[in-house]
Image (cartoon, grey):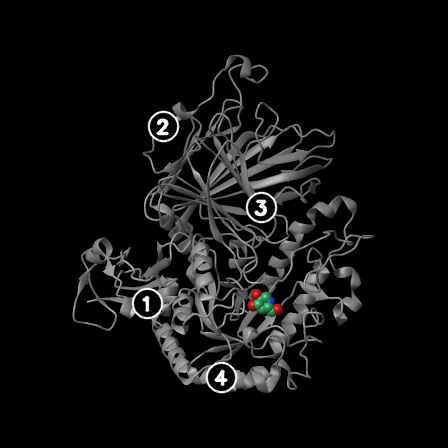
């Protein structure tokens, strides 16, 4: 890994074993991009890659330099209106009303390691030698504004992280109306754009479309990264598969409004930008004030989509997630939500917990309904003290009883929300996000607390930390069940309203930071009506998240398969729930429900007392199995093998780092009469190693056989009665 600067040719070359990224200071002192892609040799100059040139009637050239134009130039962080007509990476409104800028190179720093982003989540290093950072300092002398573009390249990961920072040094003010985190101009558009779209209960479905001239984009304006679009785009070559070919990933480490877009111009350049959505954003800077954008993680792979995903998985698992739980084996949990909803009392909970304990479950999680007057979704949010009608000894008493049984105890909160029927709302009706003189829309009878206000965040911190200090709590499920509407903060003046949505997210991060600092041993799981805020920003604070409210095994194949494009399986909460499934009313075998949920942070979400003895026996076996295999699943390398979006089957596997073990999940969705034969080709094994499959220790199979010839899937090994929704798990161990 290195970052080279050539004084003579004014080129920066960032490279590691996998990728090269080349920036040039152009003749007008702005920044151009010469190359981003597979690693190439370093040399003095790559200036031949600078394309542009004079084109008779169609050339808009710089005054005083008729050879120079930004119109066709590939740039690093482009502005609009000075010969470039494409969408810009930023926009600054100045006191005279102009939006034209000119940021020119002044200086740069190259150093080992990576700086923290104040108040924002970001990838990090544990040792300065793991990465190098380039900061390029640009200046617009008319508006006295500094712009610092940061690039970090890791030694071990095929990624570059980027962010931008604006510092205003003038005596008036400037207004940032757009500040993306990255912009990359690629020299052609022979790509397909891959992204993860969905809705509540069908999050992160894979969408692929060919790039065309014009703009294609994904976004959120909901105040959360959203279930509708995940903050991620990949550009892959049309022939790129899961295992081969080029792909560029762009993943945004942020949990609020975002825009990810690819603009293809009519000269075939693809401009990829990602950052905070400019709508609803306006940020005024006075003298010496700064604005820091969140980080984008750009991954480059020439080993197909699995190669890209594996880079994100390892980076996010080991250098984005933090704290005590980052590398620790996650407990098997029992959550009562699908078992009881709001309808429980202490004895009902203890009954479910007792059976869970007998079966070997390690953590009991009490979900929504334990606080205030919360008997349904109409009341109680905001009142973070136990409902003693349901729980006579409060959370202190219940948590102790659960711990005395030999299990850990976890608790649900929805810190950012309030019902109007709550003591908190009655005391502070102005604490909700709402626009004066307008109706305030709601969802699930709840309103959004104005987390852009420090006093609101501090109040919730006090309420939550009190209970976390008093009771024996080892896990917190932090839920968030509605998006923002009529966004306005009555605590801010007119000119600060454009800050609300970003400051809200900074408030969420602040509360997470306070709680995770004070309670480092508590495992935080994020949730947002399932997976509506499942993004890298939240992963920095909560090492696992509830992937979706849809717990049906078949639906989960798609949701978990799509989610794995970016997110490590160790962070995907995955539970076995009851049948018929509460979301899609489908009945699947209990084995298949577990065979899907194993590839995640495993747990149960049903009342085990309602199961037959036979089913309970299956659950016992599952718990034993996952206890044995969870280290491998949590820390191994994940491969997607067969895509449920394309076929009636799905398969994936995890291989241990030393390739001595692997676990494979194969799923057949609908039964097919008189079906053909299926060979499952594995991936990631050591060609020359011999493996045993399952408990059968008679025959050995070499890695190459398993990868190139494959395992014939024997129908008799599939669980259930040979009907629909069957599956099998193979466990491979070096012989
Ligand atoms: C939505 C979550 O996704 C569910 O798991 C559950 O916690 C409910 N909220 C509770 O209201």
The quadrant of the image that shows the C terminus is bottom left
The quadrant of the image that shows the N terminus is top left
Sooner in the amino-acid sequence: mark 2 or mark 3: 2
- What x and y, as percent, mark residue 383? 70, 72
What's the CA distance linking mark 4 and mark 2? 71 Å
Q: What element carries label 3?
A: strand
Instruction: Report which residue position mark 3 lands on.
Output: 219
Q: Evaluate if marks 4 and 2 touch, with contact meaning CB atoms under 8 Å apart.
A: no
Q: Disc 2 or disc 3, which is closer to the eye?
A: 3
What's the CA distance linking mark 2 and mark 1? 55 Å
Instruction: Report which residue position mark 1 lands on.
Output: 728
**Residue closest to the eye, 158 or 513:** 158
Instruction: Please indicate whether residue 318 sits to the left or right of residue 468 in the image.
Output: left
Q: Residue at x 47, y 56 (%)?
A: 320
Sooner in the amino-acid sequence: mark 2 or mark 1: 2
Q: Residue at x 58, y 51 (%)?
A: 118
- What x and y, as percent, mark residue 522? 53, 71
Looking at the image, is 143 positioned above or below residue 63? below
Q: Evaluate if marks 1 and 3 touch, with contact meaning CB atoms under 8 Å apart.
A: no
Instruction: Report which residue position mark 2 lands on.
Output: 44
Q: Residues within 10 Å of mark 1 (few under 14, many from 20)?
A: many
Mark number, residue 170: none
Mark number, residue 609: 4
- What x and y, as percent, mark residue 502? 65, 50
Q: Disc 3 or disc 4, which is closer to the eye?
A: 4
């Amino acid at each position: 890994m290195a970052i080279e600067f050539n004084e003579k040719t004014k080129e920066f070359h960032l490279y590691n074993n996998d990728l090269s990224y080349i920036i040039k200071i152009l003749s007008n002192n702005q920044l151009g991009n010469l190359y981003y892609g597979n690693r190439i040799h370093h040399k003095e100059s790559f200036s031949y890659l600078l394309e542009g040139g004079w084109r008779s009637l169609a050339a808009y050239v710089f005054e005083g330099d008729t050879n120079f134009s930004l119109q066709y130039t590939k740039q690093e962080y482009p502005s609009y209106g000075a010969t470039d007509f494409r969408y810009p990476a930023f926009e600054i409104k100045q006191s005279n009303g102009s939006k034209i800028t000119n940021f020119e190179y002044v200086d740069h720093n190259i150093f080992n390691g990576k700086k923290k982003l104040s108040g924002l989540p970001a990838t990090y290093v544990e040792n300065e030698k793991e990465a190098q950072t380039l900061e390029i300092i640009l200046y617009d002398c008319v508006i006295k504004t500094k712009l610092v573009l940061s690039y970090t390249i890791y030694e071990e990961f095929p990624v570059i992280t980027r962010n931008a920072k604006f510092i205003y040094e003038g005596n008036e003010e400037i207004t940032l109306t757009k500040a993306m985190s990255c912009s990359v101009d690629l020299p052609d558009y022979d790509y397909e754009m891959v992204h993860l779209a969905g809705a509540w209960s069908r999050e992160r479905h894979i969408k692929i479309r060919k790039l065309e001239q014009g703009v294609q984009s994904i976004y959120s304006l909901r105040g959360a990264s959203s279930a509708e679009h995940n903050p991620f785009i990949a550009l892959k070559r049309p022939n790129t598969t899961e295992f081969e070919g080029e792909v560029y990933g762009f993943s945004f480490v942020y949990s609020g409004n975002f825009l990810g877009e690819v603009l293809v111009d009519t000269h075939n350049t693809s401009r990829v930008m990602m950052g905070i959505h400019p709508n609803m954003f306006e940020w005024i800077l006075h003298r010496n004030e700064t604005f820091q954008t969140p980080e984008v993680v750009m991954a480059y792979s020439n080993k197909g989509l699995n190669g890209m995903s594996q880079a994100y998985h390892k980076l996010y698992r080991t250098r984005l997630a933090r704290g005590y739980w980052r590398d620790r084996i996650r407990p098997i949990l029992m959550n009562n939500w699908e078992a009881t909803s709001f309808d429980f009392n202490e004895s009902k909970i203890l009954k479910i917990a007792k059976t869970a304990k007998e079966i070997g479950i390690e953590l009991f999680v009490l979900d929504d309904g334990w606080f205030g007057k919360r008997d349904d979704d109409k009341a109680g949010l905001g009142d973070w003290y136990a409902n003693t009608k349901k729980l006579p000894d409060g959370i202190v008493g219940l948590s102790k009883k659960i711990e005395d049984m030999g299990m850990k105890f976890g608790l649900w909160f929805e810190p950012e929300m309030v019902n109007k029927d709550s003591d908190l709302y009655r005391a502070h009706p102005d604490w909700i996000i709402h626009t004066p003189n307008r109706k305030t829309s709601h969802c699930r009878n709840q309103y959004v607390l104005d987390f852009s206000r420090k006093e609101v965040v501090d109040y919730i911190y006090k309420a939550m930390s009190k209970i976390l200090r008093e009771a024996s709590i080892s896990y917190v499920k932090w839920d968030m069940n509605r998006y923002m509407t009529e966004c306005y903060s009555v605590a801010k003046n007119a000119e600060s309203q454009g800050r609300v949505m970003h400051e809200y997210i900074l408030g969420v991060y602040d509360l997470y930071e306070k709680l995770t600092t004070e309670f480092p041993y508590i495992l935080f799981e994020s949730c947002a009506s399932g997976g509506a805020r499942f993004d890298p920003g939240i992963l920095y604070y909560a090492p696992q998240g509830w992937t979706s409210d849809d717990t049906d095994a078949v639906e989960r194949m798609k949701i978990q398969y799509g989610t794995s494009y970016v997110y490590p399986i160790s962070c995907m909460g995955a539970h076995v729930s009851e049948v018929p499934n509460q979301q899609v009313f489908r009945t699947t075998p209990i084995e298949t429900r577990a065979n899907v949920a194993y590839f995640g942070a495993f747990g149960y979400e049903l009342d085990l007392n309602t199961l037959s003895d036979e089913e309970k026996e299956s659950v016992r076996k599952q718990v034993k199995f996952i206890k044995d295999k969870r280290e491998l699943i949590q820390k191994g390398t994940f491969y997607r093998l067969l895509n449920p979006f394309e076929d009636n089957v799905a398969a994936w596997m995890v291989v241990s780092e030393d390739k001595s073990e692997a676990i494979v999940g194969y799923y057949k969705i609908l039964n097919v009469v008189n079906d053909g034969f299926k060979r499952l080709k594995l991936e990631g094994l050591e060609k020359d190693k011999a493996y045993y499959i399952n408990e059968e220790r008679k025959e050995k199979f070499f890695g190459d056989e398993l990868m190139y010839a494959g395992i014939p899937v024997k129908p008799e090994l599939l669980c259930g009665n040979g009907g629909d929704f069957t599956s099998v798990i193979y466990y491979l161990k070096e012989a």
